[in-house]
């Protein structure tokens, strides 16, 4: 019997994929990556393992990858200020190359000739998985059941799961496709496909509605050392714990909700709902600190790099030579990104209200319009003449 390793989430698609692959003669080994989706009201990994076995898996591997995820994937993206199309902080996109890496490792361990995933032919994740697997081991066969099977809708998949007695946590009334990790949650499908309809509150898992939040704001101070977040309000945290803390605090104040129509890699537009409290807070604070310590030309050029970096992550090119080269540039910009940013969380917003750094390039004596002004305004006339000279006719 041919052995295959399936990236298993425990959701509708991958649960159906286990049974579908088994019916076609495969021995299915499931791999479950713990990227932080099991926190709070998140996944129950024991239940996931049981679901995979009921569906027909011969074996289930569950591996805690949270520390590797935040250190080797989330942190580089944070340093790069990577945000796709100005809104998406790339939680799911960052997790895929790490899962694919371990898919390959497990295929080698199990002497499997193929790997599989539960991605659709319309999505980005199929590209992220398959390109990464192709880079790491081009000899492995890749099978994508959702691109091949007979089901034409999620409703048909639900019927198949029920007929096969596979326990699932989705219904026709709430047929959302959800991917969650420590860096954020992606939510799509169901009523969200109606662009004219506001996302219902039951679509959100991590954040409170801004209309239900206290009228009192929450202030917190984030301290960075060379681009790495180290402290919240003076208390030192390991990165994973820091992110978890900010997810909890930010979620209570409705921070990190995004509702957008984005351009998928395959060429279609799709509506996505995202929740990323910690990511939003850290992105805002990190970018604000950079504005304080980076000179103008470096700051402006890094904006270009950030855009390209986010595209590479979104497009599944984490292990590409260009992304590796950009990491070197980004790391060189972080040498003086140390200091703290005070933030105000209020009814879904996250606003910088205080800044300090030993490497600050802000000089009050040059910026002030009050006493102590040392800026020689007489020099401005000459500067303007020279600056505008090429444009005079």
Image (cartoon, rainbow, N blue to C red):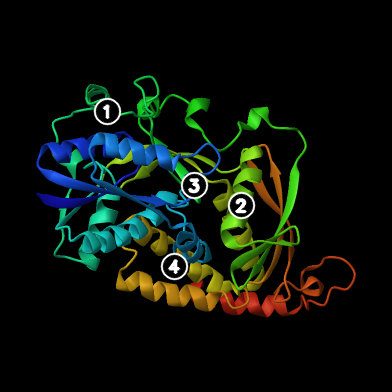
Q: Earlier in the sequence, mark 2 or mark 1?
A: 1
Q: Secondary structure at mark 2?
A: helix
Select label 2 or label 1 by which is in front: 1
Q: Is residue 89 left or right of residue 366?
A: left
Q: Secondary structure at mark 3?
A: strand
Q: Earlier in the sequence, mark 1 or mark 3?
A: 1
Identify whether 237 is placed above or below 199.
below
Q: CA distance from mark 2 to mark 1?
A: 34 Å
Q: Is residue 239 left or right of residue 340?
A: left
Quarter of the figure with residue 218: top right
* Disc 1 crowd, CA 10 A, few/some/many (<14, 14-19, 20+): some
Marks 1 and 3 close (CB-CB < 8 Å): no
To which residue does mark 4 refer?
Answer: 305
- The answer to whether any part of residue 10 appears in the image is no
Q: Is residue 280 left or right of residue 62?
A: right
Quarter of the figure with residue 167: top left
To which residue does mark 1 refer?
Answer: 154
Select label 3 or label 4 by which is in front: 3
* Front in this rendered view, residue 311 or 58: 58
Select label 2 or label 4 by which is in front: 2
* Front in this rendered view, residue 393 or 205: 205
Checking the image for residue 242, the label placed there is none
* Front in this rendered view, residue 355 or 61: 61
Identify whether 233 is placed above or below 359.
above
Q: CA distance from mark 2 to mark 3?
A: 12 Å
To which residue does mark 3 refer?
Answer: 184
Identify whether 82 is placed above or below 334.
above
To which residue does mark 2 refer?
Answer: 281
Q: CA distance from mark 3 to mark 4?
A: 23 Å
Q: Earlier in the sequence, mark 3 or mark 4?
A: 3
């Amino acid at each position: 019997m041919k052995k295959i390793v399936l990236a298993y989430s425990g959701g509708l698609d991958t649960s159906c994929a286990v049974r579908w692959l088994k019916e076609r003669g495969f021995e299915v080994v499931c791999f479950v990556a713990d990227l932080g989706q099991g926190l709070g009201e998140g996944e129950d990994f024991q239940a996931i393992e049981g679901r995979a076995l009921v569906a027909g898996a011969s074996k289930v591997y569950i591996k805690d990858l949270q520390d590797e995820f935040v250190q080797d994937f989330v942190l580089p993206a944070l340093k790069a200020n990577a945000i796709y199309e100005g809104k998406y902080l790339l939680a799911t996109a960052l997790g895929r190359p790490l899962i694919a890496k371990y898919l390959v490792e497990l295929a080698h361990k199990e002497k499997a000739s193929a790997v599989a995933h539960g991605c659709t032919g319309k999505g980005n994740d199929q590209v992220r998985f398959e390109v990464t697997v192709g880079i790491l081991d081009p000899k492995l066969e890749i099978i994508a059941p959702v691109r091949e099977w007979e089901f034409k809708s999620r409703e048909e998949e639900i019927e198949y799961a029920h007929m096969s007695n596979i326990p699932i946590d989705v219904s026709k009334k709430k047929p959302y496709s959800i991917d969650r990790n420590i860096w954020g949650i992606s939510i799509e499908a169901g009523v969200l496909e109606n662009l004219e309809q506001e996302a219902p509150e039951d679509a959100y898992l991590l954040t409170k509605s801004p209309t239900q939040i206290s009228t009192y704001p929450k202030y917190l101070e984030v301290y960075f050392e060379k681009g790495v977040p180290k402290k919240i309000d003076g208390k030192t945290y390991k990165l994973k714990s820091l992110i978890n803390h900010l997810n909890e605090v930010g979620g209570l104040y409705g921070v990190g909700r995004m509702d957008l129509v984005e351009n998928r890699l395959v060429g279609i537009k799709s509506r996505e709902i995202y929740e990323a409290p910690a990511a939003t807070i850290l992105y805002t604070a990190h970018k604000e600190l950079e504005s304080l310590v980076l000179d103008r030309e470096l700051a402006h050029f890094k904006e270009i790099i950030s855009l390209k970096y986010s595209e590479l992550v979104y497009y599944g090119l984490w292990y590409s030579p260009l992304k590796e080269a950009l990491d070197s540039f980004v790391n060189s910009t972080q040498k003086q990104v140390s200091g703290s940013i005070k933030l105000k969380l209020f009814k879904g917003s996250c606003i910088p209200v205080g800044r300090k750094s030993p490497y600050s390039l802000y000089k009050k004596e040059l910026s002030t319009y009050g006493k102590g002004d040392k800026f020689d305004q007489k020099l401005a006339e000459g500067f303007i003449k020279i600056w505008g000279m090429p444009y005079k006719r």
